[in-house]
Image (cartoon, rainbow, N blue to C red):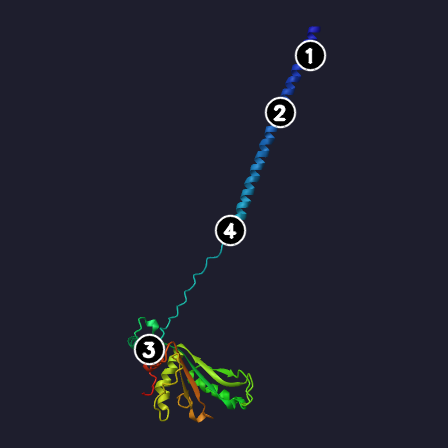
């Protein structure tokens, strides 16, 4: 009986051990199944995330994609008109420069004196009582030179002349470049021959540095001025500023450019 009981207990123990093994095996199988499910879920989540990111990226890319630019029509370029030199400027470079280089022995063309500017200046004492006189004179200078003049004012007060500092007393124009050559051409070839009993310009009006100043007593010698509209005759000073170092060089420069000096 004791042996039978021992066998039963052994069988029971073995049965319990098998049950435990089966439970462990099932638990392992279930754990593996859960891991597989979790792995599949993660993989699906990743694929979904990648799909969304791609769609977002595509959307952003589409939003950022700029519309194709329309080809800009090229505007026709303006043809630059060649600068036409005045007759006097052409004469200076073609005739005056070679003659001056030969006479004074200049080695370089840059040493040859040239005309820098022309200053036209007038002063009217009647403008102290009537400013309209000065306005009329400035308009006439503008017609003669083709450039609007600057009104000049007194720098200091002079009691004998009843002049106060800052009062407008004259007008001035400074001509350079093309306007300068055009004005000198008209002055020499048109205005001066209209002067009554003209005998030529004096040669003693140089300042020692090659600059020359001449005076005109009437503005009506210029063809731009209508004689019937002139209320009063006004004179003016015209200064030719050159790059010459001596009076002789300045005089020869102006002579070759057409200035009619008196024969000494």
* Residue 9 disc label: 1
First reached walking from the N terminus: tag 4 or tag 2: 2
Q: Measure the alpha-carbon separation of dots 1 and 3.
A: 142 Å
Give the residue number, with chain letter if any, for mark 3: 92
Give the residue number, with chain letter if any, for mark 4: 61
Mark 3 and 2 residues: CB-CB less than 8 Å, in contact? Answer: no
Mark 4 and 3 residues: CB-CB less than 8 Å, in contact? Answer: no
Which residue does the image show at 67% across and 12% down from the upper left? Answer: 10
First reached walking from the N terminus: tag 4 or tag 3: 4
| Residue 179, placed above or below residue 49 | below
First reached walking from the N terminus: tag 3 or tag 2: 2
> How many neighbours does mark 1 have within 10 angstroms: few (below 14), some (14-19), or many (20 or more)?
few
Disc 1 or disc 3, which is closer to the eye? 3
Disc 4 or disc 1, which is closer to the eye? 4
Which residue does the image show at 45% across and 85% down from the upper left? Answer: 141
Disc 4 or disc 2, which is closer to the eye? 4
Residue 236 placed where, x, y %?
44, 87
Residue 219 placed where, x, y %?
42, 89
Disc 4 or disc 3, which is closer to the eye? 3
Which quadrant is the C terminus positioned in?
bottom left
Q: Secondary structure at mark 1?
A: helix
Which residue does the image show at 59% across and 33% down from the upper left? Answer: 37
Q: Secondary structure at mark 3?
A: helix
Mark 2 and 1 residues: CB-CB less than 8 Å, in contact? Answer: no
């Amino acid at each position: 009986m004791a042996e039978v009981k021992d066998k039963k207990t052994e069988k029971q123990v073995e049965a319990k051990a098998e049950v435990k093994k089966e439970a462990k095996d099932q638990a392992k199988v279930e754990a593996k199944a859960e891991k597989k499910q979790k792995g599949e879920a993660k993989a699906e989540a990743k694929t979904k995330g990648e799909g969304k990111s791609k769609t977002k990226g595509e959307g952003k890319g589409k939003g950022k994609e700029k519309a194709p630019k329309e080809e800009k029509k090229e505007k026709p370029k303006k043809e630059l008109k060649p600068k036409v030199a005045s007759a006097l400027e052409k004469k200076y470079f073609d005739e005056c420069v070679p003659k001056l280089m030969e006479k004074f022995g200049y080695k370089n063309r840059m040493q040859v004196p040239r005309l820098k500017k022309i200053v036209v200046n007038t002063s009217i004492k009647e403008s102290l009582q009537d400013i309209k006189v000065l306005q009329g004179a400035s308009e006439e200078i503008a017609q003669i030179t083709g450039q609007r003049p600057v009104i000049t004012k007194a720098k200091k007060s002079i009691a004998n002349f009843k002049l106060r500092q800052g009062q407008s007393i004259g007008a001035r124009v400074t001509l350079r470049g093309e306007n300068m050559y055009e004005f000198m051409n008209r002055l020499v070839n048109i205005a001066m021959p209209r002067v009554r009993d003209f005998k030529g310009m004096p040669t003693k009006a140089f300042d020692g540095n090659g600059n020359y100043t001449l005076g005109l007593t009437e503005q009506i010698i210029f063809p731009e001025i209508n004689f019937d509209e002139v209320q009063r005759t006004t004179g003016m000073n015209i200064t030719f500023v050159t790059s010459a170092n001596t009076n002789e060089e300045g005089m020869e420069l102006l002579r070759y450019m057409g200035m009619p000096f008196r024969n000494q």
